[in-house]
Amino acid sequence: MPDLAHAQRWKALAFIAIAQLMVVLDGTIVNIALPSAQTDLGISDANKQWVITAYALVFGGLLLFGGRIADLWGRRRTFVTGLIGFAAASAIGGAAANEAVLFGARALQGAFGALLAPAALSLLAVMFTEAKERAKAFGIYGAIAGGGGAVGLILGGVLTEYLDWRWTFFVNIPFAAVAVFGALRFVHEPAGSRNSSGLDIPGVVLATAGLVSLVYGFTRAETHGWSENTTIGLFVASAVLLIAFVVVEARVKAPLLPLRVVTDRNRGGVYLSLGLAIIAMFGLFLFLTYYLQVVQGYSALKTGFAFLPMIAGMITGSTQIGARLMTRVRPRLLMAPGFLVAGLGMLLLTQLSVDSSYAGLILPAEILLGLGMGTAFMPAMSLATHGVEPRDAGVASAMVNTSQQVGGAIGTALLNTIAASATTTWVAAHAAEARTLGKQGFVNAAAVHGYSTAIWWAVGILALSAIIAFTFVNTGGGGGVVAASGNKDAEGAEDVALPVIAH
């Protein structure tokens, strides 16, 4: 490969990374600003969840569609369109004069994010196919995917405290402008990597409706309870729609999600183990944020900076451990131990008390969590497109984002429900201690008991992630490559894939 093309590929990575950071941090940056936005726009307590939910529903529901659009329309074009649309939606959100405009802007962000996220990952998949440079590229991407949420907490705290909540939206505009410039100048999609098949409209409708029902079901369960009729109805509808989607995909000529993408044991193991790990991580972000702010009395800004060791650990684990070892050892020997190390960090946090020391307990737990997740995320991101044909790279990438998005929705709802239930039980059992502890002390003790109970569940979920990764992921070192396109026979058989590079 010519040196110029090689250099441009690495420059392209920098701008793709900026775009991915923008999408990932947007999932948490608004959380910090939400109380200020609620007061400013007069949003009711009942409606405030829609600032988060509008984004999550549209983003999660349209990801598979966005991934297939990238395969059909071209990843570079989809990437640039997603960036411009995301920036425009952010400008609308920042300038919102009422709650309806803000909710609409968040939904628009979700729609363009669903184009942008799979296009970014699939560009890496088709641009970096040599094992060592692929490891480096996905090391950087994995660090951003894992740490971007925590970066959002820091940036959200800084912008809200020193500027205004609106800047949590406006900040996306310079991010997007820089990424568009870099994409137009340095991103060059390999020829012959598009999918010329038609769009599977029934698949789009079923997948979108099914995923929206699933994400909204978990979101509603958090606020209305698991046994509420609408919540149950949403889960039933999601199951019916997604089963119908699988049936349709098995029969149509040009499916939205070719079943070969998810039935491969390595990719399936990645999607499942990654989704479970995200359940644990999102629950932790929620509990640790509340613990630091409500129980320990940290400001929003100080809370954001308290997550820095976790970010540093993720970057180190991804770029210095995962990227360096991925070409030498089997991916499962990075993913499974990575999830276990993260689980050890989570195990430390089960010992939280009202007066726990940050340096003595939270700091070492964050470092272990960061190192473990960074080490596991890096090969997982690379394996997400393991062995896929270039024409399927977009939708395979979308499956990673879908597993993360659904995992995030499940994690927030499920673990928060477990924490709330444990808190209620503790209050009933320790009512006699209310006078001794004082009102605030009693409330804090009950909340911390709920957090630690839910974190125990997160430990178990990470252990399950490790077992799945070790059992299902059996490819050799190097994390796999995107398959090269081959010739089809007259029956339209799948393209022949190159063997996975092993070391």
Image: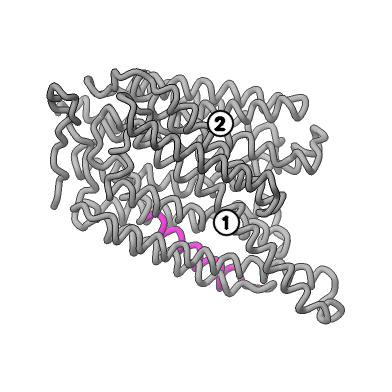
- Residue at x 40%, y 59% (from the top left corner): 465
What type is the residue that disc 1 sits on? Gly
Per the picture, the main secondary structure of the magenta-coloured stretch is helix
- Residue at x 42%, y 54% (from the top left corner): 314
On the image, the x and y values in percent for residue 260 come to 28, 38
On the image, the x and y values in percent for residue 404 come to 47, 45
Residue 17 figure quarter: top left
Q: Is 137 displayed left or right of 212 in the figure?
A: left
Q: Is 369 displayed left or right of 495 in the figure?
A: right
Q: 56 and 317: which one is in front?
A: 56
What type is the residue that disc 2 sits on? Gly
Bounds of the magenta segment? 356-375
Q: Is residue 177 above or below residue 152?
A: above
From the image, tell me which residue sits under label 2.
110
Count the labels in the image.
2
- Mark 1 residue element: helix
- Work out how far the residue at label 2 is from the one at label 1, CA to CA, in angstroms: 21 Å
Q: Is 367 displayed left or right of 433 in the figure?
A: left
Q: Is 329 displayed left or right of 468 in the figure?
A: left
Let me know if residue 491 is in the magenta part: no
Mark nearer the N terminus (2 vs 1): 2
Q: 314 and 379: which one is in front?
A: 379
Question: Residue 283 — which label?
Answer: 1
On the image, the x and y values in percent for residue 166 come to 69, 32
Q: Is residue 222 above or below residue 98?
A: below
Residue 111 shows up from this direction: yes
